[in-house]
Amino acid sequence: MKAISWGLLLWLITGTACAEVVVVVSAENPVESLTSVELADIYLGRMHTFPNGESVVPVDQRENSLVHHEFYSLYLGRTPAQIKAHWSKLIFSGRGQPPRIVAGDKAVAEFVSGNHQAIGYVTPDLVDKRLRVVPIE
């Protein structure tokens, strides 16, 4: 009985701690959707333009944030440690720089809404008329 109680408590704690994450661009950005491969390529430094040829500026959140963990887990299938290792290799070899890191959801929303080349991720409650959710196919 105790095992079930502890299991239920753990599920409730982790279940309520999970944040939904959506990928966003400025409402001015013409991109209507991205494939999961395109999104991964943008955030792993392999793609520097949107599919329409416009430059892309990916914006990231702090590695220790729940939203960061959820984004990379949900959309790229990677852990923060794997992402850190990926970028460490690219930085060391001089082949790339990681996405710009901003303080959190509000900072991402501000940056992306003011830059039509930017792409970021936030919790859905921060999406307003300045931002558009990009479906990932």
Image (cartoon, rainbow, N blue to C red):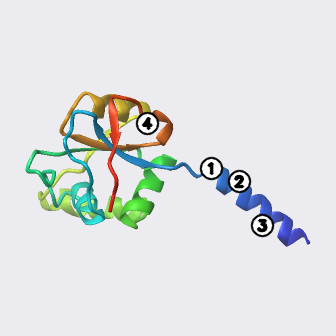
Image coords of residue 112 (percent x, y): 29, 34
Q: Earlier in the sequence, mark 3 or mark 4?
A: 3
Number of other residues with Cα within 10 Å of mark 4, as a class: few under 14, some 14 to 19, many 20 or more: many
Residue depicted at x 25% and y 47%: 99
Mark 2 in CB contact with mark 1 (< 8 angstroms) = yes
User: Seen in the image, is 60 located left or right of residue 2?
Assistant: left
Residue named by callout 1: 17
Q: Quadrant of the N terminus?
A: bottom right
Number of other residues with Cα within 10 Å of mark 3, as a class: few under 14, some 14 to 19, many 20 or more: few
Residue named by callout 2: 13
Whether residue 27 can be seen here: yes
Number of other residues with Cα within 10 Å of mark 2, as a class: few under 14, some 14 to 19, many 20 or more: few
The amino acid at mark 3 is: Gly
User: Seen in the image, is 77 located left or right of residue 111?
Assistant: right
Residue depicted at x 71% and y 53%: 13
Q: Earlier in the sequence, mark 3 or mark 2?
A: 3
Q: Which mark is residue 7?
A: 3
Vertical position of residue 120 compared to residue 12: above or below = above
Q: CA distance from mark 2 to mark 4?
A: 22 Å
Q: CA distance from mark 4 to mark 1?
A: 16 Å
Mark 3 in CB contact with mark 4 (< 8 angstroms) = no
